[in-house]
Amino acid sequence: MQNILIVEDEKRVADLLKKGLEENGYKTLVAYDGAMGLRLFQTDSFQLVISDIILPKMDGFELCKEIRRINDKVPVLMLTALGFTDDKLDGFDAGADDYMTKPFDFRELIARVKVLLKRDIGKTAAPPEQTGYADLSINLNLQEVRRQGRVIKLSPKEYNLLVYMVENAERVISRMEISEKVWNTHFDTGTNFIDVYINYLRKKIDRDFDTKLIHTKPGVGFILIEKP
Ligand code: CA
């Protein structure tokens, strides 16, 4: 079922939206201020966000920008009591996809919601399902790794590291790049954290096979390349 986040501080309007959307077969969650909206967005998966502009704690523009930082695909429909063109432009500037002025006609809102959700499906319909390198194949939907058809079990961290290396195969990747792109953080250069995970991966990916895929470039980093 499609999940819609409603961010609206006027309880009456929030209730109306929730009830109306649920009657149309959507699942909804309501936040009564911008900060709460952002928290909910981070903890659940939504196919659409409907947000008021004037909100306590964080306004709709700011919320929309934050959402865009996390997810640039989810459609955002902005609501406002103010019908000013400037608001509309600011909304689009913040990354909103559509805009409605309150009070709105509910049927029109549902029509816009349907259009936005369809557009979202169009954008996300073709995610890569399969990637790989040499005799290594990764089913991205199942998060299943195989080498020569044999399933290899990896921890989530090992899996993320391997997928990143496969996506950047035949290119030297530095420890810094791995810590930023795979762990989304900066480790101080004294740590051998990355090397530990590379070794875990080597044991699982390379140890039982003649052709080694994971190689160290001393003083630089690592490379995924097919070499005996
Ligand atoms: Ca408001």
Image (cartoon, grey):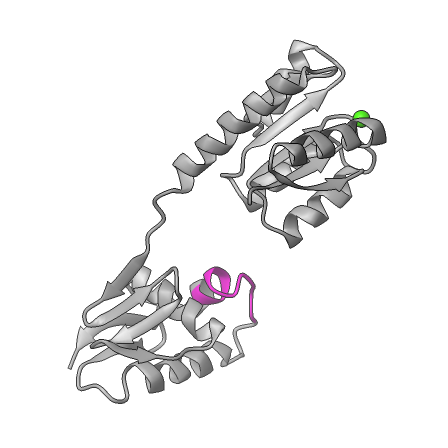
Give the vertical position of 46 relative to 115 (above or below): below
- Dominant secondary structure of the magenta stretch? loop
Q: Picture coordinates of residue 140 (x, y %)?
A: 37, 61
Residue 92 visible to an observer of this rendering:
no
Does the magenta portion include 184? yes
The residue at the far left in this view is: 228
Residue 102 figure quarter: top right
Q: Nearer the viewer, residue 148 or 19?
A: 19
Q: Nearer the viewer, residue 127 or 65?
A: 127
Question: What residue range appears in magenta?
Answer: 178-187
Q: Is residue 36 left or right of residue 3?
A: right
Tell which quarter ligand 1 is in. Answer: top right
Q: Residue at x 73, y 35 (%)?
A: 7
Q: Picture coordinates of residue 107 (x, y %)?
A: 62, 18
Give the vertical position of 215 relative to 38 (above or below): below
Q: Is residue 47 left or right of residue 60?
A: left
Does the magenta portion include 83? no
Q: How many numbered discs, if any?
A: 0
